[in-house]
Amino acid sequence: MKQYDPHEIEPRLQKAWEEASAYKVPNDGSRPRKYVLEMFPYPSGDIHMGHVSNYTYGDVIARYATMRGFDVLHPMGWDAFGLPAENAAIKRNSHPAKWTYENIATQQASFQRMGFSYDWDRKVVACDPEYYRWGQWLFLKFWERGLVERKNSPVNWCPDCKTVLANEQVEEGTCWRCHSEVEKRDLTQWYFKITDYAQELLDDLDQLDGWPERVKQQQANWIGRSEGAEVEFEVVGLDGAATDEYITVFTTRADTLFGCSFFLLAPEYPGLMEFVEGAGHEAEVQALVEAASKVSAVERAQGEREKHGVFTGRCVINPVNGEQVPVWVADYVVADYGTGAVMAVPCGDQRDFEFARKYDLPIPPIILADDDPLFAQLNGVKERQVTSVDWEEALEAEGTLVQSGEYTGMRGGKGSEGEAAIVAALEAAGRGRRKVEFRLRDWLISRQRYWGNPIPAIHCEHCGVVPVPEDQLPVLLPEDIDLAAGETLATHESFAQCTCPVCGAPARRETDTMDTFTCSSWYYMRYTDPRNDTAPFAPEAANAWLPVDQYIGGIEHAILHLLYSRFFTKVCRDMGLLNFDEPFTNLLCQGMVLDAHGEVMSKSKGNVVSPEDMIDQYGADVVRAAMLFLGPPEKEKLWNEDGLAALNKFLNRAWRVVHDLVGKAGEETLFDPNADALNAHEKAMAMKRERHRVVGKVTADLDRYNFNTALAAIMELVNATSDFLHLREAEHRMNCETGGPLTRDVAETIVKLLAPIAPHWAEELWQNVLENEGSVHKQPWPTYDPELAKADEVELAVQINGKVRSKIMVAAEAAEDDIRAAALAAVEGELAGKDVVKSIVIPSRLVNIVVK
RNA sequence: GCCCGGGUGGCGGAAUGGCAGACGCGGAGGUCUCAAAAACCUUUGGGGCGACCCGUGUGGGUUCGACUCCCACCCCGGGCACCA
């Protein structure tokens, strides 16, 4: 018997598979299609354990689907634009493209060493002009549809990366990439109007039954829908007269309007200084605005802080009762949510309550819990009798409205009767209307960096900002740039200078590039038609393969990439390019691979393990199997070197068992010539049952991506086979008595069950030991017969009052009464002197006898 | 504060409401060997000489029967957060 030698087998088979284009996707539509996709990697250097787990899961799913009869699209590419390449280039005085393509070559070689079944003809590299040109094309189409906007607003600026960031890319006030503290800057930037799709992005989460709940929850949180109303407050002039000017607020609690005792503006409220001019408090307001602007993003992200505010000297009129209320500037008002102005109701909002306490503002009670001592006094009272209360905290829950004019006595709270009535009255009076607000902001996509997809726009002093005509795409990134010397696209004159496509006058090219997340928002579409040079993809190709049946990637993209991709899909659908709403039908979010102590692997900690080293030592199949055996894919996994040795032992053992089964083990045979052959027939039948039981179990487990328990079941089959082989006599008997060549069936079954997991191991045995034609990976998945998996006799536990007291063997098909009788007989001694109240029979499991 | 997950042997982890701990690691003992490694066999939740007893974060509940369902609480991980 040839020893299992992955170092000889794996390279040889990888070469053969490559030469045969073994994983080129058949696309004749003769079999049902399945699209299995793993998130494409950033070419950051060598592959790490996160790649190994992610891509091993994907490869097992893809290979299994192929054996289950699907034509499987399983492509791979690289998310190749981005800052690390640029930083590396500056450091080495080189070019980002060099670093990027070198890393891609390294990673691709590693993926091939891992035996991943990608259709390499469909490789997509995001920094190739043939790819990014279509990203530019999509940008122009988005622009045509009114989904591109240039606007000036306060943005997040990372001083280290020297670029702006999208909201989604700021984590607790720091840059998601380098974790430097971000600064707020007022800049004119490019946006995708993802907010136009906010409602649909939220609603369609309900379609995604195949997504983890936590991801959907995170997206819903991020989109942050609030139902409420806009209310207009008329501004009182400096002379105390009405002005017919209004400030609008957004509120979800219009029911509490009668309790509004002051009014707030954000420090960044547009036109604030003009508004307060002449009211006598300009200096204090100015000081507060400056103090607020000094609060760092990190502090801001800490959550609740002490509130600060100053009176502006101005007043507005509450539209429900005509009362004048003072306008304050307060640093807890968020400028870019709602209108940046807020009506303050201290009795019904904890923040306003704290503010009122601090600055000694009145807290008129207008909503009360029914057990509030004040309720007896104010129940039904419409006019304000009590002007302020001395509570511990605001009542944010539901309650009954008091001192609220004609609304007194109604229920108050979010979406309450009182809220509806007051909004209706405001609408009738033209002072308010229903409004839905979202927390989601538009997606800031421009970046002040070189290594990205150039935004195809031109600035003309006569025509304004105009799109680059489609026939001039792609706007190529210039290659001759000296980043180390500080050159940028903006200073690269041969790039920046151009002519206006509208009027022909000299003009300036846009020198910002697009967020790399724009590249990853549609790459899965490109894979369906990767070499198309007249369109990003043909709709027929995309609609044939998409949506992705199974998407696999890290949880860190729960919001960023997954939200952006959903947005792109919906826009492409509205453009008529796609005929579905959601890009990823099923989503598997793998947990992180940590070291044996549960620590994140990092270079600085020195606990990084190298997949390449492990392949060198054990071969790819062992690495794959060890990764799968670690635990459920979506959980965090603690990597332990012992697992490699264990799975190496298992593949060796299974290797020998397969040889033994087909009589090729030679001297090393596991057959025991001295073993007792008396029960050979029974053991052969048991072997056959085990084979069918395990195929059923492995099939069910792989369907649910329970790779660890699937492997455990295969181990059980191998163990059972190994035990069985100790009977030489049994081999002969089972072939005669079970109506077929069982040994060969068991051997082929073991090989096929392991094929998705250990593809080289299985292929070698399939072709060179079992001597079959073709690849094991093109074979149909083994079938199983649930009837054959059933035993003739089963063991049942006999319980008395839920405690196991005995075991009995009964025929599998025994009648309930017979089982009950056998059980009672088995524990007869213990039942003496006791009343049997009843007995419960659970077929093939247990009998529970209830006694008193 | 709000919203999601999750607490099971020495360890990773199994268990459609039905014998808790599959499978593997580790441990103990053995076979083979001059010896070791490898391989193979036996054993391995805790306690007790034993019949047995105790065990799935804690406390209740439902049930003939609860790791599993319900209620309350504790701890760990993640997301959101002055969002009006």
Image (cartoon, helix red, strand yellow):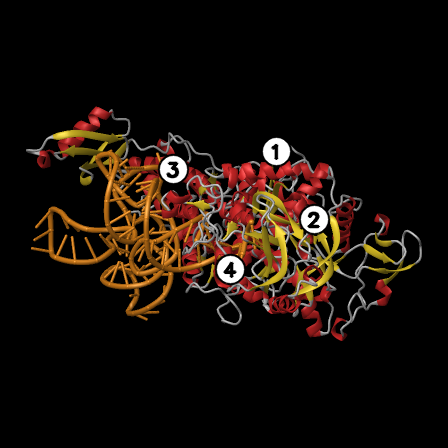
Q: Which is in the foreground here, disc 2 or disc 4?
A: 4
Residue A843 drawn at (x, y percent): 28, 30
Q: Determine the chain carrying the residue at label 1.
A: A
Q: Determine the chain carrying the residue at label 3.
A: A
Q: Quadrant of residue A820?
A: top left
| Among numbered discs 3 and 2, the one appearing first in the sequence | 2
Residue A658 drawn at (x, y percent): 43, 46
Q: A162 left or right of A844?
A: right
Question: What separation in Å lies between label 2 and label 4 (alpha carbons)?
Answer: 35 Å
Residue at the disc numbered 1:
A31
**Tag 3: residue type?**
Arg
Question: What separation in Å lies between label 1 and label 2 (alpha carbons)?
Answer: 40 Å
Question: What separation in Å lies between label 1 and label 3 (alpha carbons)?
Answer: 28 Å
| Label 3 packing within 10 angstroms: few (<14), some (14-19), many (20+) | many
Residue at the disc numbered 2:
A193
| Residue A693: image tag | 3
Do labels 4 and 3 touch, CB within 8 Å? no
| Residue A355: image tag | 4
Question: What separation in Å lies between label 4 and label 3 (alpha carbons)?
Answer: 68 Å
| Among numbered discs 4 and 3, the one appearing first in the sequence | 4
**Tag 2: residue type?**
Lys
